[in-house]
Image: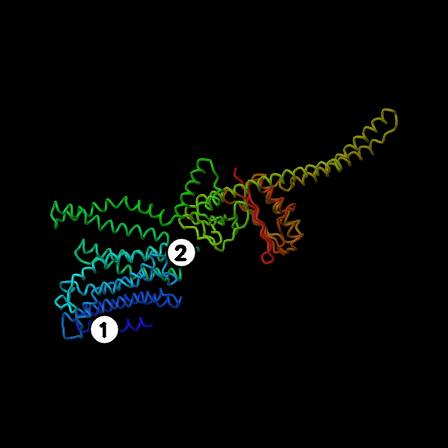
Amino acid sequence: MLLWVATAALAGLGLCAATVLGGLADVSVFALSVTTAAVPMTAGYLAIRHEPDNWVGACLTAAGTGIILIIAHGQWQEALAAEPRSLPASPVLWVLTQGVWMAWFVPYALTIALFPDGRPHGRPGRFAVAALLGIPPLFNLLTAFVPGPLMPPLAHWPRALGTHPVGYLSLALLPLFLAALAASVVSLARRRSAADSPARRAQLRWMLLASAVVPITLLLCWLGYLVTGGPGLVIVGLVAMNVLVPAGALLAMLRYDLYDVDKALVLTATYTLLAVFVLVGYAGVSAVVGRALGADSVAAGVTATVAVMLLLLPVRAMLLRLLGRRLHPRRAAGLDALTALAERVNAGTDVPERLEEVLRVALRDPGLRVGYRRPGGTAYVDITGAQVDSSDGQMIGSSGRDVGLVVAGPGAAPVPPDVVAAMTLLADSVRLRGELAGALAEVEASRARLLKAGYAERRKLEMNLHDGAQQRLVSLGMRLRTTQHKARTGHEVDLDALVNSAVEELADAVHELRALARGLRPSSLDAGLPAALDSLTRASAVPVEVTYAAPGLPDHVSLTAYYVVSEAITNAVKHAQASRVSVDVRHTDEALRVLVRDNGNGRARVVAGSGLAGLRDRVSALGGSLDVTSSAATGTHVEAVIPCRS
């Protein structure tokens, strides 16, 4: 609250000075400064609301106060230089505030040194806090005695406290001040290394990403004086500092999991170093070429620009690689492990199913799990078939398809997004190999069931032949042989009765053989599948509506389709208590599609040993598929797709 009151008072002084100056530009600068100060003050307010007892919020608020202080100080000086009698002034105050510019840096550096719990960490943190609080007042005191005029625009004002060579010691404080800014960043980096939880490490990485801009901004100011002769470059750093530090603090405290902070950290460090290389390289090349061609030569500027850009082309890739390994070691370890596994798989010395094991070792996460999407389902299973909980998983995708997911172990940090992306091909290979193995196992099981069913059918046929037609024919043969023996021995034989009996026996045997043949292949199929379906329709106990559009089918396809329809109608009448059945048979895309729907109670299930299970095996044997969906609301739908390529 005191900082807000002080900010309001300073804003009033600045507005008063801007009014005295009277120019539109001066008022606009003041308004822009107030807007700029609103960023850290808003961040400070939100931080205090989130953690009222934490000094971080107060430091962010102080950053806004410092901005208003610097602007008010500068505009008051401008007003006094333009109209000395327009505002009250104290020469002592002016000589003691030559280092007011430090108010840009001190609050932000304290925010970094005290983040996230409001206390400094280790020796670098304690040094940073002590130096940041001690150097500014000592610097202002020493600069009050520096021989020579004051800084513009009040260069003509007298030094109210006199001059003394001791004032030059203020220059020695500048490297210490830069060291204090750097120490705050080092303290934060060490705190991150010592963090014992993924959440805290993610928080500190966000703040570390933003913190580097503070000492870099001061370096930009000094480089600006060396390269351009003025502090123009510092404006870029001040704007970045005023945005990144408050934003980094808020993200770290409220939404640390919003983005891959490690990737952002690597990119920021890379382009920061590139910016420094550009400045140093441009200055160096310009100096060398300018000496030969002239300092103001256009050719010197063009040559310097081209030379620096050519030098930076390979440097960028090298920095991304080196800093990526240094600042994001888990990402580098994961990518290296995946690359090595892929090479071994391609060489045939390893299998992709070791993906989970390899990642556990590389990421040092023994609880990590990789799940793969089951075909036609929503569950995720590992290579052993155990289900993997998908609530906290990171999705693995391939060409818009959901391949699987990876779940970090309890208490472990999430898998870096780049590693998740690099897993896609290996995970897809594992999933496809699993699907293929499952399909082969199902084909083998289906083959075994077909062989068993065929053996059972042969046994049944053998028994029916043995107990039926075969017995009749054997009995008839024995009677004929007996009659022949009687005739040879002179006994009287009734030939009419014998022939009539033999004909009846033969007719019965033929009837039984035809019945057995109809069990193997319905005779109605001799006239084609439409006629056979019409026969089923007439024989059904419920109305059956048939739609047919499939001319010229192979015999084995017609036979399988007939059995599908026959079994589905029988189940609808016998088990589902349906009152209506519809049959749709049509030829599409070199396959026969058979769909049988009823309005029954929807209790159909494909279980081992059932008629539907046998149908599925029969259809699978032809390379097709049989799907059964059944519910009380929609009845039962039996759909078979049977390839019928010539």
Q: Secondary structure at mark 2?
A: helix
In the depicted structure, whether residue 453 falls above or below residue 176: above
Horizontal relation, residue 479 to residue 399: left or right: right
x, y percentage for residue 193? Answer: 39, 53
> What is the x, y in percent for residue 615?
61, 44
Q: Classify 10 Å Cα crowding around label 2: few (below 14), some (14-19), many (20 and above).
A: many
Q: Quadrant of residue 130?
A: bottom left
Q: Nearer the viewer, residue 518 or 423?
A: 423
Is residue 47 toward the left or the right of residue 436 in the image?
A: left
Which residue is farthest left? 294
Residue 320's place in the image compared with 490, above or below, is below
Secondary structure at numbered mark 1: helix
Q: Nearer the viewer, residue 188 or 507?
A: 188
Residue 628 image point, x, y percent? 58, 50
Q: Dot 1: few (<14), some (14–19), or many (≥20) neighbours within 10 Å?
A: some
Q: Is residue 398 left or right of residue 243?
A: right
Find disc 2 in the rendering and name its residue: 202
The dot on residue 420 is none
Q: Amino acid at mark 2?
A: Ala
Where is residue 294 drawn, in percent x and y?
A: 11, 48
Residue 528 seen in the figure: no
Q: Are marks 1 and 2 in contact (CB under 8 Å)?
A: no
Q: Amino acid at mark 1?
A: Leu
Please tell me in which quadrant of the rendered image residue 506 appears.
top right
Question: Residue 13 — which label?
Answer: 1
Rendered view: 342 above or below 109: above
- Work out how far the residue at label 1 is from the one at label 2, CA to CA, in angstroms: 42 Å
Q: Nearer the viewer, residue 157 or 386?
A: 157
Foreground: 505 or 145? Answer: 145
